[in-house]
Amino acid sequence: MRVVFGPGRLAELGEEVARLGPRRVLVLGTPEQGATLQRAVDGLGDRAAGVFAEARQHVPAEIAAAAADRARELDADGCVAVGGGSSVGLGKAVALRHGLPAVAVPTTYAGSEMTPIWGLTEDGVKRTGRDRAVLPRSVVYDPELTLTLPVGLSVTSGLNAVAHAVEALWAPDGTPITAVMAEEGARSLLAALPAVVDRPDDLDARSGALQGAWLCGAVLGATTMSLHHKLCHVLGGSYGLPHAETHAVVLPHVVAHNAPGAPAAVAALGRALGAGADADAVTKALATEARDLGAPTSLAAIGMPREGLPDVVEQVLAAPYANPVPVTRESLTALLDAAF
Ligand code: NAD
């Protein structure tokens, strides 16, 4: 896949689409991002067929069908998805179900644009899968578009991306190259986020964060996720906890849990944080940075009912997946109690 990266590169969107072939594209996004969608339309010139600004979290199948219908009405032969994981997810669903190729213009740090992972919610049930057909043909990263991303969302979506990198570091199918990418992705984001919080309009900090998000998304797409993602999936799916915030709360606890079986991952994360290789010190540094950035620090604070914790334990135990240390009822209960 192609990637274009740099401040102001949105201006090249029309050229990028032309290089890939579609004659007329439908611009996809969320209702809140009207001004950014308009900038994309301006950048596309004659190639813009119209705008469909109804992207929503968890990609409802009827929204994907409505976007494909709109594309047909407008005689569009491709899409440009502008926004975060919800917009990019809509582009992927349209590519999967309706065969229209997409170009992505990410505006958060979620990293979905780098993965072949799709999600679709039908009759209240969210299904996910992997299919290379949903990978955007090209990604245009313009850090200027992230200047408006609110600080709170920048932090949680950035820590969500760091979680992808951490799980890639201990993934069963990780490689020396994904390890290098994951460490640098985490380092880049963890270095940039404090500056983003202090100076949200600092373009260098925004560029560093987006570069980190690119790497973290790439390793999410290239490896298999473990306990952390399973936990967050259950907490979000069954208890409606917010996606990025849940990742921010849970990550240090999973690092503490998995550290004994993943010394190389802990050492890499320690280098990324400048915290040495001692597991306790690395876990503490990660939790401290998240707290200092203003991220939520407990499951209670983001709406988890305590009485639901035993059910989460059972759900996580019921689905087998690779993890660097065995997951037991006792270890999971202790992890969730601490996170609560
Ligand atoms: P999002 O796309 O839902 O966006 C959150 C909010 O921020 C929206 O209201 C949006 O309009 C607004 N927003 C986005 N960019 C902005 C900007 N630059 N300025 C101002 N407002 C902006 O959030 P997200 O965290 O990017 O994505 C979360 C979703 O992505 C989840 O559903 C998650 O499951 C999915 N996801 C998928 C993958 C994958 O590989 N398939 C990877 C990561 C996340």
Image: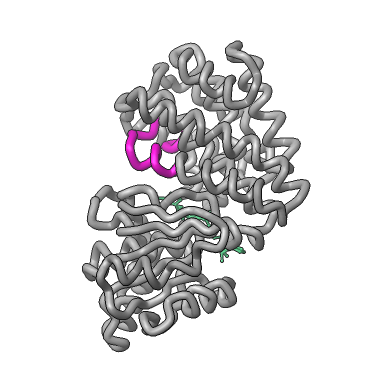
* Residue 114 on the magenta segment: no
**For residue 226, which quarter of the picture?**
top left
Seen from the viewer's position, the closer of residues 159 and 256 is: 159
In the picture as drawn, the residue positioned furthest to the right comes out as: 198
Residue for point 25% across, 70% down? 21
Q: Position of residue 215 (x, y in %)?
A: 45, 40
The C terminus sits in image quarter = top right
In the depicted structure, whether residue 273 falls above or below residue 61: above
In the picture as drawn, the residue positioned furthest to the bottom comes out as: 73
Question: What residue span does the magenta drawing correspond to?
Answer: 217-231
Residue for point 30% across, 66% down? 19
Residue for point 60% across, 60% down? 144
Residue for point 31% across, 29% down? 320
Q: Position of residue 315 (x, y in %)?
A: 40, 36
In the depicted structure, whether residue 190 falls above or below residue 9: above
Left or right of residue 28: residue 197: right
Left or right of residue 186: residue 132: left
